[in-house]
Image (cartoon, grey):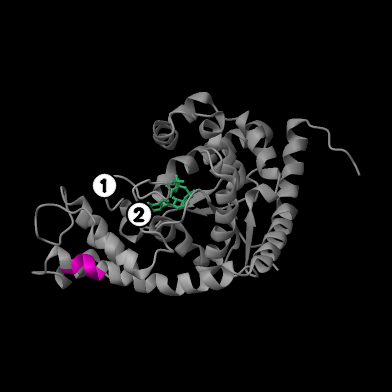
C-alpha cells in the first residue's frame, strides 16, 4: 500500500489536554501529507514521562490523543497511528543514539532549560536526553519530513546532526530529515493568552493561558475574552502588542485571512469585539472535532484496534532500520 512513498513522522506527548497550539502548529497540518507520503503519527508516551505523570491520567490521555488524531481528520487506514511504547525499537534506538549525542549539544537545548526550571525537583536524565529519543523516533522510519511547531526546530536540528554523525561513521544508514514548520502567521507558535511572550503549553498550570481543543464553546469564548492585551485600542500587530498579535495570528489560522485583511476588518472596532470574534471563530472551528472526539472516545475497543494495527505497521518498518543499525555498530544478530 505504501511502497516507494516518502515518509512523514510526527508525534504529540500525552502530557496534558491538547491545546490550539498543538492543533494549529502540528496536528491540523498532518492530514495534508496522507496521500503523498507514508505518514507515521505517534502518541509519544515515553517522552511524556520525562515529567512526572499520574499513571491513570497518562493512560487516559494516550487514548484521548489517539482519538484526537482521528477526530482531526487522520484516517487510520491511510496513516500509521500508534503509541510509542508499543514499539520497543524507539527506546532501543534511543539508547544507541544517546551514545552518538554529545553532552554539550544537549546542554544547549532551550526546552531542557525551560523544563528543568519548571520541574526543579525532577531534573532527570530522560529530560536531558529527550532529543536523542526524539531523533530515534524520526530516524527509525527513514523520515524525510517532520511537521512540527517552531518550538521543536532545535530538536529537529539535533536529529539531523545525529543522523549525519552516524552516517559519517558507518556509511548511509539514516535519511536526514527536514522540518516542516508552518509560517509564523500559520500557527508555528501560538502564545499563551495570559503571558503572550510565552508559548502556549498544554502543561501550563494557568487554565486561562491555554485554549484546549476539547474546551466547551463557552469556555473557549470566555478564555479569549480574558486574554491579556495592552493598554492601546488598535487591532494591529506590532511591538508591545504581543497579545493582539497572537490573537490576530490565531484568527488568521482559523479564517485563512491575512494580517492586513484582519486589521482592515476590525479597523475602528474595540478589543472586546475582536476577542469575541476570535473566540467564536475558534469555537466554531473546533466543534466538529469535539463531536467526533466524543464519539471515538466512547469506543475503546476501536481505539485499541487502531493501536494494534499501528504498532504492527510501525514495527515492520522499524525492524528494518534496527537490523541495519545493529549490524553497522557491531552487535551480533541472532538468526531465528
Ligand atoms: N504553542 C504552540 N504553537 C505551535 N505549535 C505548538 N506545539 C506545541 N505547542 C505549540 C507543537 O505541538 C506538537 C506536539 O508538541 P509536544 O506534545 O511534543 O510537546 P511540546 O512542544 O512541549 O508541547 P506543549 O504543549 O508545550 O507540551 P508540554 O506542556 O507537555 O511541554 C509539536 O510539533 C509542537 O511543536
Q: Residues within 10 Å of mark 2 (few under 14, many from 20)?
A: many
Q: Earlier in the sequence, mark 1 or mark 2?
A: 1
- Report if residue 81 is visible in the image: yes
Q: Nearer the viewer, residue 64 or 311?
A: 64
Q: Nearer the viewer, residue 229 or 168?
A: 229
Residue range highlighted in magenta: 273-277
Query: How far across and how far down the image is residue 59, in percent?
Result: 60, 52
On the picture, is 281 further left or further right than 269? right
Could you tell me which residue is drawn at 42 percent across and 62 percent down? 213
Could you tell me which residue is drawn at 35 percent across and 70 percent down? 217
Seen as rendered, the residue at the extreme right is: 336
Q: Quadrant of the C terminus?
A: top right
On the picture, is 90 further left or further right than 73? right
Would residue 300 be counted in the magenta stretch?
A: no
Q: How many marks?
A: 2
Q: Secondary structure at mark 2?
A: loop
Q: Nearer the viewer, residue 189 or 194?
A: 194
Could you tell me which residue is drawn at 68 percent across and 33 percent down? 170
Query: How far across and how far down the image is residue 304, in percent?
Result: 68, 62
Q: Residues within 10 Å of mark 1 (few under 14, many from 20)?
A: some
Seen as rendered, the residue at the extreme top is: 104
Q: Secondary structure at mark 1?
A: loop
Q: Quadrant of the N terminus?
A: bottom right
Report whether the residue tagged 1 is closer than 8 Å to ligand 1.
no
Would residue 276 be counted in the magenta stretch?
A: yes
Residue, disc 2: 210
- Report if residue 256 is visible in the image: no
Residue, disc 1: 195
On the picture, is 313 further left or further right than 110? right
Q: Are marks 1 and 2 in contact (CB under 8 Å)?
A: no
Amino acid at each position: 500500500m505504501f511502497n516507494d512513498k516518502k515518509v512523514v513522522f510526527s508525534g504529540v506527548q500525552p502530557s496534558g489536554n491538547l491545546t490550539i497550539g498543538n492543533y494549529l502548529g502540528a496536528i491540523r497540518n498532518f492530514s495534508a501529507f496522507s496521500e503523498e507520503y507514508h505518514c507515521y503519527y505517534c502518541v509519544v508516551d515515553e517522552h511524556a514521562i520525562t515529567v512526572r505523570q499520574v499513571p491513570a491520567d497518562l493512560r487516559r490521555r494516550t487514548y484521548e490523543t489517539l482519538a484526537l488524531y482521528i477526530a482531526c481528520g487522520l484516517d487510520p487506514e491511510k496513516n500509521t497511528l500508534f503509541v510509542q511504547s508499543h514499539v520497543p525499537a524507539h527506546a532501543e534506538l534511543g539508547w544507541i543514539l544517546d551514545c552518538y549525542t554529545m553532552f554539550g549539544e544537549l546542554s544547549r537545548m532551550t526546552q531542557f532549560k525551560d523544563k528543568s526550571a519548571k520541574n526543579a525537583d525532577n531534573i532527570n536524565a530522560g529530560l536531558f536526553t529527550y532529543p536523542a529519543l526524539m531523533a530515534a523516533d524520526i530516524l527509525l522510519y527513514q523520515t524525510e519530513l517532520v511537521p512540527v511547531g517552531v518550538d521543536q526546530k532545535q530538536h529537529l536540528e539535533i536529529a539531523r546532526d545525529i543522523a549525519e554523525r552516524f552516517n559519517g561513521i558507518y556509511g548511509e544508514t539514516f535519511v536526514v530529515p527536514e522540518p516542516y514548520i508552518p509560517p509564523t502567521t500559520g500557527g508555528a507558535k501560538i502564545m499563551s493568552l495570559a503571558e503572550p511572550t510565552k508559548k502556549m503549553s498544554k502543561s501550563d498550570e494557568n487554565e486561562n493561558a491555554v485554549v484546549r481543543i476539547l474546551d466547551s464553546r463557552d469556555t473557549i469564548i470566555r478564555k479569549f475574552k480574558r486574554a491579556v492585551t495592552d493598554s492601546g485600542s488598535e487591532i494591529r500587530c506590532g511591538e508591545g502588542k504581543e497579545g493582539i498579535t497572537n490573537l490576530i495570528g490565531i484568527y488568521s489560522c482559523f479564517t485563512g485571512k491575512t494580517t492586513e485583511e484582519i486589521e482592515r476588518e476590525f479597523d475602528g472596532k474595540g478589543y472586546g469585539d475582536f476577542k469575541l470574534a476570535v473566540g467564536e471563530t475558534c469555537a466554531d472551528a473546533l466543534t466538529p472535532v469535539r463531536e467526533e472526539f466524543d464519539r471515538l472516545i466512547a469506543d475503546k475497543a476501536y481505539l485499541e484496534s487502531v493501536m494494534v494495527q499501528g504498532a504492527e505497521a510501525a514495527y515492520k518498518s522499524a525492524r528494518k532500520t534496527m537490523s541495519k543499525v545493529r549490524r553497522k555498530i557491531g552487535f551480533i544478530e541472532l538468526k531465528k
